[in-house]
């Protein structure tokens, strides 16, 4: 009989023990929701930043491609018109391509590429070399990342008379 009483006492003690440690308190629940919310916000913010960074880098690569293409187009113009290339006056020019022939236009309408990028070629006299045989050429490509955030990339080279 004493073993039966011990069992009864134990069974009475168990529900009280479970009642104290069972379930979550309201404070624990609020804390868990706050931690989950903060971590979800951090992950979402990180994904948005990664998306913006990817877009920015894609646009920078395209702009660099157009800038490098502008330098190469001016080299082609120099190679095809070596006698007249070094007579260009310093200033901002725009590239045009008609019938597979590159040309430089002083002033006028800017060259728009991909409905987004504007390419400008600046030709200047080279200071340390005779102007009759060399020109400093800078190609600038600009675009708007957002309406309030313009961006641009520029490459500069010195072209000389190679003959």
Image (cartoon, rainbow, N blue to C red):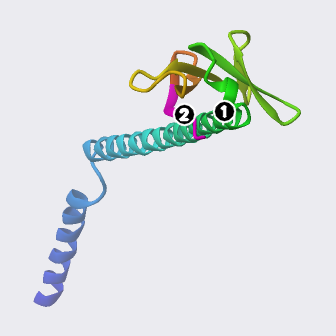
Dot placed on the residue nearer the N-terminal end, 2 or 1: 1
Quarter holding residue 91 = top right
The residue positioned 60% from the left and 35% from the top of the image is 71
x and y percent of residue 95 in the render?
71, 25
Front residue of this view, candidates 152 and 43: 152
Q: Which mark is residue 111?
A: none
Q: Are dots 2 and 1 in contact, CB under 8 Å?
A: yes
| Res 32 visible | yes
**Image: magenta residue range:** 152-163
Extreme residue in the right direction? 99
Q: Is residue 63 magenta?
A: no
Tell me the CA gap for discs 2 and 1: 8 Å
The residue positioned 68% from the left and 35% from the top of the image is 73
30 sits left or right of 67 in the view: left
Q: Where is mark 2, residue-wise?
A: 159
Q: Which mark is residue 78?
A: 1
């Amino acid at each position: 009989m004493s073993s039966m009483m011990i069992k009864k006492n134990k069974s009475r003690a168990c529900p009280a023990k479970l009642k104290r440690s069972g379930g979550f308190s309201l404070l624990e629940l609020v804390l868990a929701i706050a931690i989950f919310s903060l971590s979800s916000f951090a992950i979402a913010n990180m994904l948005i930043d990664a998306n913006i960074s990817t877009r920015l880098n894609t646009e920078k690569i395209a702009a660099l491609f157009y800038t490098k293409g502008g330098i190469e187009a001016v080299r082609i113009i120099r190679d095809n018109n070596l006698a007249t290339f070094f007579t260009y006056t310093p200033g901002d020019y725009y590239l045009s391509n008609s019938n597979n022939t590159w040309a430089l236009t002083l002033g006028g309408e800017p060259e728009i590429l991909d409905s987004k990028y504007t390419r400008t070629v600046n030709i200047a006299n080279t200071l340390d070399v005779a102007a009759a045989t060399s020109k400093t050429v800078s190609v600038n490509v600009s675009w708007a990342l957002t309406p309030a955030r313009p961006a641009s990339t520029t490459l500069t080279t010195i072209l000389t008379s190679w003959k």
